[in-house]
Structure formats: C-alpha cells, structure tokens
Image (spheres, rainbow, N blue to C red):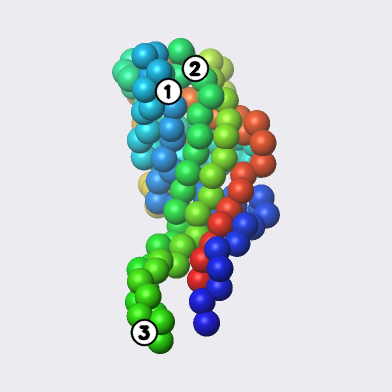
Amino acid sequence: MRKAARQQNAGWAFNVFDKAPFVTVSMTRPDGTPYGLPLSLVRRDERTFYFHCAAEGEKLDCLTHNPVVSLSAVSRCSPVFEEEKCNFTEHYNSAVAVGTASIVESAEEKTEALRLLCRRFLPDHMDRFGEAVARSLDRTTVVRITLTEPPVGKCKS
C-alpha cells in the first residue's frame, strides 16, 4: 500500500543530504533571476556545509550580491507503476534547507573543508591529499553555507 508523502525530522533530512550524490544550490543573480546548480557538498556538522570552486565566476557573483541560498537533495528516486490503481507515481527521499553562504578565508578551515570533501568523494586517495592541497590551496575558493533553520525532509514510499 502506498504511503502519503510525509515530513521527516532534521536528522533524517541530514541523512538525505549525506547520501545524495550532489546537492542543488539555488541562489539569486544580481539581476534578480534565479540560478541553481548541482554541486558536490559536504556537511561538517548540523549547521555547516562546504563546497569548493574557482576564484571567480557566476556562483561567486551571485553569492556576493545575495548570500542567501537554498539547498535541495534527493537520495532516492524510484518511478513506480501501481498496478492495482493504474497509477504512475514516484517513491523518493528528499531534503531542503536554507542558509547563508560566505567565503572561507582561513587556510586552516579551507584545508579542513577540502579534507572533508575528499574523504566523502574520494576516500581511497587520502594519501595524496596533502600534496594536492599544498599545490592548489591558494587558488581554490571554499564556500561555507551556514544553515539558518533546520532542514526538512520528505519521503514517499
């Protein structure tokens, strides 16, 4: 039997963010139009996410203009045909959150964020982390997103 979509607690929502292969970060361009893109984010704790990028570009232009962002993630998505109801539907786990983005200035926090990103996405290559970060830290921008309210998760199964 199909269960209706239901809201989950913040801990459940964090689990969705942690399992999602990417998180869509939505922001506002200086002209007021929306700009959203999938990024590789990592969560440090219950308020802090990080991503890295080049030192210039549209993301940073948007965040300089307006640092408020929305995060959305899907960790499970399964299209389903319910034979008994002749109904098309989708089972999913999703989460959303709102936060404020800022550029990380401290070399120590940048290194910590990059280490967290590498552990999440390439854990088998941590032996090369020190060499890579020494070569690229100065030209890598790290953005911290601090949540301004607890995340909300939804699921339908």
- Is residue 62 placed above or below 48 in the rendered structure? above
Q: CB atoms at circles 3 and 2 under 8 Å apart? A: no
Q: Position of residue 11 (x, y in %)?
A: 66, 53
- Is residue 6 placed above or below 46 in the rendered structure? below
Q: Element at badge 3?
A: helix
Hey, which residue is sitting farthest bottom in the picture? Answer: 84
Q: Element at badge 2?
A: loop
Find residue 66 and name its label. 2
Q: Earlier in the sequence, mark 2 or mark 1?
A: 1
What amino acid is found at the position of numbered circle 2 in the picture?
Answer: Asn
**Alpha carbons under labels 3 and 2: distance apart:** 47 Å
Left or right position of 88 against 153 = left
For image coordinates 57% across by 34% down, the residue present is 98
Crowd class of label 1 (few under 14; some 14 to 19; many from 20; radius 10 Å): many
Q: Which residue is mark 3?
A: 83
Q: Position of residue 157 (x, y in %)?
A: 51, 71
**Alpha carbons under labels 2 and 1: distance apart:** 7 Å
**Alpha carbons under labels 1 and 3: distance apart:** 42 Å
Which of the pair 97/132 is nearer the observer?
A: 97
Q: Nearer the viewer, mark 3 or mark 2?
A: 3
What amino acid is found at the position of numbered circle 1 in the picture?
Answer: Thr
Q: Residue 97's quadrant in the figure?
A: top right
Q: CB atoms at circles 2 and 1 under 8 Å apart? A: yes
Find residue 58 and name its label. none
Q: Position of residue 60 (x, y in %)?
A: 40, 18
- Is residue 68 placed above or below 90 in the rendered structure? above
For image coordinates 36% across by 84% down, the residue present is 83
Crowd class of label 3 (few under 14; some 14 to 19; many from 20; radius 10 Å): few
Q: Which residue is mark 1?
A: 28
